[in-house]
Amino acid sequence: MATQKLSELAKTIRSKNAGVDLITFDIIFTRRENYDRVRRSRVLSRETMAQLFGLSPERIADFVEFDPANAIKFTIYRVRPSGSPGDPDIFGAQQYAPLLDLQIP
Amino acid sequence: MKTLRIICPNGHLGFAPLRLESFQLGVDAHPDYIAADSGSDDVGPGPLATDTSTSPLSWQTHDLEQMLLASRKIGVPMIIGSSGDTGSNSRVDLYVKIIREIAAAHRLPRFKVGYFHSEVAKEDLRRRMRAGEEVRGLEGHATLVESELDATARIVAMAGVHPFIALLKQGADVIIGGRSSDSCVFAAPAIHHGFPESHSYYLGKVLECASFCAEPYGGKETVLGEISMDDVLVTAMHPGQRCTVASVAGHAMYERSNPYFEHVAGGTLDMAECHYEQVGERTTRITGARFIPAAEFRVKLEGAGKVGERFIGLVGIRDPYTIAHVDEVIEWARAKVRERFGDGTDGAYELHYIVYGRNGVMGDLEPLKDRPGHELCILVQGVAPTAAMAEEVCMIGSRQMFYARLPDVKGSAGSVAFALDEVLRASPGCRWTVNHTLRCDDPLELFPTHMTTAGV
């Protein structure tokens, strides 16, 4: 099968604060087969996300595959709490863009 | 009582007004309670540090008026948590005052208003720390030390169900809460009426953000939750929205690091074995929630402090050579600030550059930071103890970019473009200082409750 972008397979790709020290990312699929395809591909994992965002592995706080919602979810530690002077994204709502074009086999 | 029904019209009362059509449909369903949470730490540290609201008073009043008039009309209690964005004492007192003014204006028959405060005095916390109590850090924070306490302007404790239940037992018709876990605003009445903690906390979890648990996406619409001894049902009230297995399960993930667990004062809601089932066109049934009581009663504390006054400047760059060397331009300006005020490592000032067009939104997380656009906008922020100093830090940090000396630049009349040749006063720079937990002997010790009346 030809590769497809993650944004073509997922219904929702978002990022948002989870408390003041964390940003959490949700990738939610409408169709189970797309969810399974992305999981099987291993394109999304703790290691690949650390690499994509240029993070040391310990800054990935959590990585969960959440079957009831056909969703993959991971969470990262911020360097400084949300809203500190210099923080460009107080709500953490615009950090997901690098996920959109990930190629899924 | 075989079941208990609660409507929630707004996931953050005051932040944007509730929508009237679905709220009226919810009220017409004659629920047993009308409840909403009014707070969030999403609004940043500023409101707590400076004891203000980000929500406009008119929107807060609008929603409180709608909820109060409806609850008095159908004769059921109304509950508000985390009043005025932060749940600080002044916000609670403000909401109590608004309730009394609305009641007087509409000549509502007299009713009982219960309220509780959530602030923790710094000196109280310092006493506990000096007595050996460990104020444990959450999410990577070290144990609280006195220097961080000194940097804190205000601390609120996150209430669980306990003060709400105490006020319900005293017969409150309206409860105005200080800072509290969103889910506990709804779990408290369910537990008060004898329903299991497991389903009660789940009911709160699913209702707390109102229509965020429904689809299609649309905030500020009313949803109705119904709890029995065996399950929770949640129904969208807006005719165009549905609570589906996908939308309800998806909501369990929202704004949390892990979709399976919700920590509250006194225990943890475990959603790992939750089962979701579509039982009506707009209704989903949830079973399998569990509640694990905590071995030790610990309360979450939130604290914020003011770093200093803040000014901002805006700078544009179009020359591709200058764009490629923007870090050197910034370093030139930083050096001029250092010459004037020192290096800032002693906390004397802060100077921040956000480079839009390169990695402004994502900073170090940006994978494309080596591919800047053909023009850049740079937001300069100067923060310092006094407004005059913050203005000068920001002014040097912005204007000196104009004079940056790059070896091979063709344009020798100025390195950057100014749309304004001034810097502007912004809100004070603030930061979160406390994200910790404190052990308590009594679930109510940080949350004194009070009762008053309103109406005529």
Image (cartoon, rainbow, N blue to C red):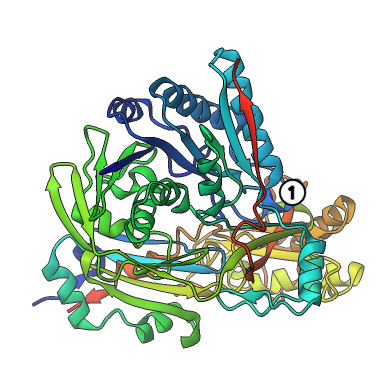
Above-or-below relation of B253 to B407: above
Is B411 on the left-hand or right-hand side of B153?
A: left
What element does badge 1 sit on?
helix
Q: Position of residue A67 (x, y in %)?
A: 21, 70
Q: Residue B273 appears in which quarter of the rendering?
A: bottom left
Q: Quick one: quadrant of the C terminus of chain B?
A: top right
Residue under the image location 28 percent in, 59 percent down: B250
Q: Position of residue B102 (x, y in %)?
A: 58, 20
Depth check, front residue: B202 or B326: B202
Is A51 on the left-hand or right-hand side of B134?
A: left
Q: Residue A51 appears in which quarter of the rendering?
A: bottom left
Residue under the image location 50 percent in, 65 percent down: B266
Residue that protrudes farthest toward the right in the picture? B340
The chain carrying label 1 is B
Query: Which amino acid type is shown beneath numbered disc 1?
Result: Thr
Residue that protrudes farthest toward the left in the picture? A1
Q: Position of residue B412 (x, y in %)?
A: 74, 63
Which residue bears the numbered disc 1? Answer: B50
Is residue B403 at least partly visible in the picture? Answer: no
Is residue B18 at least partly visible in the picture? Answer: yes
Is A18 on the left-hand or right-hand side of B386?
A: left
What number of labels is visible?
Answer: 1
Q: Position of residue B77 (x, y in %)?
A: 45, 33
- Are there few (<14), some (14-19), or many (20+) residues within 10 Å of tag 1? some
Above-or-below relation of B75 to B275: above
